[in-house]
Amino acid sequence: MAQQKADFIKVPTGPSGFQTMPVDPEKRFPESEIRIEMCTEEDVETIAEGLYTSFPDGFWNKMEPLELRPPEQITRVKRLAKRLQPSFTNPNMKWIKAVLTSSGETIGIAGWMGPGNPEIHNIFRRSAIDHYGWKEKMGWSDEEIDEMWEHVSDEGWNGTFGKDDGIRKDVLGDEPHWYLAPLLTWPKYQGRGVGKKLLDWAINQADATDPVTPMYLESAPSARPVYMHCGFVPQGETNFVRRGPAIVRGLEAEDEELGKEDALKGKLADVDVTAKAKGTETDVAA
């Protein structure tokens, strides 16, 4: 059966007016061309490379200001990989990858923190080192830790992720949930349904429990429709919660309601005009 194109979901956009559009069915990878696999610690540098390749310059300029960066890009990659490496020791952290079956090439990555994690604490924060006991597990010195973080903006990086954790805590409290961070597809493969497959890996598990397990994520405003199509309900400008399958609509629903209201007003105006016309005719006849 031919795949159907998803309905358009209209969301608020920035000055550029850009938002992610539904994937054309003919552009999606066939099921047989992609497989989803668990990442291993050997994939950590690929994950770091994918983050630098797939996330926009505006994000990285905030997180790693130009004036703080080392001269070589490979240094940034290796430092980020080193910061992420201990997350593989957490049994609740599930790194998965989308792989082309024809070549074995990794074309997408998702990081899912499972509902068994006892507390909300993003693995990307510097404070995760102490929170999860990584310094001791990895045998890191204070100098090593300082070096891997020396080109990173504390306010941009740790401030942002810390604030996001606070919002997530306000929304979910201590409720066990799946948390997505990050989701990425290599640029040349974007718009072909890779992200959906990485989402479905956890969605299928969340929906299989009784009751369903909540899911939570943050998203760039332009990418909101991707998650809304999968049943994630906006909680604010950037955060979403999913509690099982749902049809979620955007601004197009408001446009439709306004259209209905305008049409109704038009009909009422026509009725009023007709009534007045009939009244005038009666008065004349009298």
Image: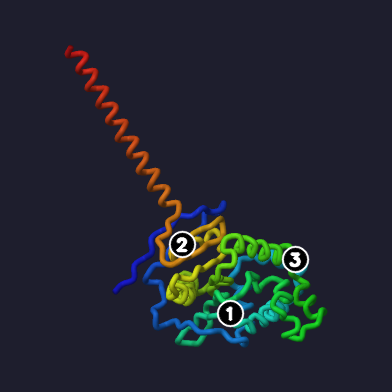
The 10 Å Cα crowd at callout 3, few under 14, some 14 to 19, many 20 or more, is: some
Mark identifier at residue 154: 3
> In this figure, which residue is indicated by the disc labeled 2?
228
Quick one: quadrant of the N terminus?
A: bottom left
Residue type at mark 2 is Met
Q: Is residue 122 visible?
A: yes
Residue type at mark 3 is Asp
Whether residue 19 is situated above or below residue 201 in the rendered picture: above
For the point 51% across and 74% down, the residue is: 188
User: Could you tell me residue 116's position as x and y percent?
Assistant: 57, 77
Alpha-carbon distance for marks 2 and 1? 25 Å
Q: Locate residue 119 relative to residue 198 in the image: left or right.
A: right
What SS does tag 2 mark? helix
Residue type at mark 1 is Asn
Q: Earlier in the sequence, mark 3 or mark 2?
A: 3
What SS does tag 3 mark? helix
Q: Are marks 3 and 2 in contact (CB under 8 Å)?
A: no
> In this figure, which residue is indicated by the disc labeled 1?
92
